[in-house]
Every structure is written in structure tokens, then in C-alpha cells.
Image (spheres, helix red, strand yellow):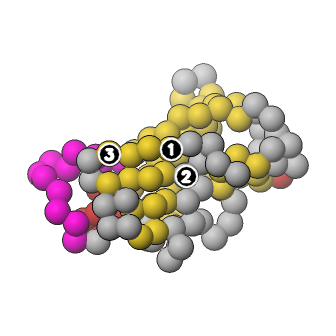
Amino acid sequence: MGFLTTHVLDTAQGVPGSNMSVSLYRIIDNQRQLLSQQMTNSDGRCDSPLLKHDDFTVGIYELEFGVETYFTQAKVAQPTPAFLSDVTLRFGIANISDHYHVPLLVSPYSYSTYRGS
């Protein structure tokens, strides 16, 4: 059975994105269903998979990262209002036997992601 993980890298400071909120939603009929909310640890990772076992199903999902709050708490300069508030990544899970790893590389002005392993 597959599972879903994430981690955050703060590319502005060159450190793991620790203590950032991460919310996971399943998209059903264009509506968001909250599945999980976690905070990243000191390594920028969640302490447990965001999705696993019977909850790990084929479908469309969103990860939402609390970027503005993270950079505010880290005392990284941002404009008012911040350029990035929450970063939302929408992605699909097609194979429930795979490990899906969806990291976020982020600064106050940009972000990127990829499917990792």
C-alpha cells in the first residue's frame, strides 16, 4: 500500500522549513474535504505520512502550506501584504501502491515542487 509524504525547504535561508502548517485536502465534486493538518518538524518534514493505508485512494488532492506565517515567525522580510500567503499544490494520485512525495521549496517570492521519492 502506498502513502503520501512531504517536506519543506526554505530556499531564502537555506534551512529546512520547520514549524510550518501543512493541510491535506481531498477534492470531491470540486469541494475540498480536510483530511489532515500537521506542522513540520525541525527537519522540515511531517512526523507521519499525510495519507496512508485505506485512506490512500486514487483521486485529486491539495496540500496547503502556511508560508506567510512561517516567514513572519522566522523574521524574514516580506512586503505587506505578503506576496505569498498560503501555497496550495493540487496533484493527482493515480497508483495506490506507490509512495508519493510532494516537497515544497519556498522563499517569500517563489516556490517549486516535484514528485520525489
Residue type pointed to by label 3: Ser
Q: What's the distance in space between the residues labelled 3 and 2, CA to CA?
A: 14 Å
x and y percentages locating residue 64 in the rendered image: 47, 47
Residue type pointed to by label 2: Pro
Query: Which residue is under mark 2?
Result: 103
At label 3, counting other C-alpha atoms closer than 10 Å, the crowd grade (few under 14, some 14-19, many 20 or more) is few
Q: Is residue 40 left or right of residue 66?
A: right
Q: In the image, is residue 29 above or below residue 8?
A: above
Query: Which residue is under mark 3?
Result: 110
Residue 9 seen in the figure: yes
Query: Which residue is under mark 1?
Result: 113
Q: Identify the element where label 2 is drawn.
A: loop
Specify start and end residues of the magenta stretch as a single range.
75-86
Measuring 49% from the left and 59% from the top, which residue is drawn there? 8
Q: What's the distance in space between the residues labelled 2 and 1, CA to CA?
A: 6 Å
The chief SS type of the magenta part is loop
Occupied quadrant, residue 91: top right
Occupied quadrant, residue 97: top right
**Residue 77 is one of the magenta-drawn residues:** yes
Measuring 59% from the left and 48% from the top, which residue is drawn there? 102
Q: In the image, is residue 90 above or below residue 12?
A: above
Measuring 17% from the left and 63% from the top, which residue is drawn there? 77
Along the viewing direction, whichever of 107 and 28 lies nearer the viewer = 107
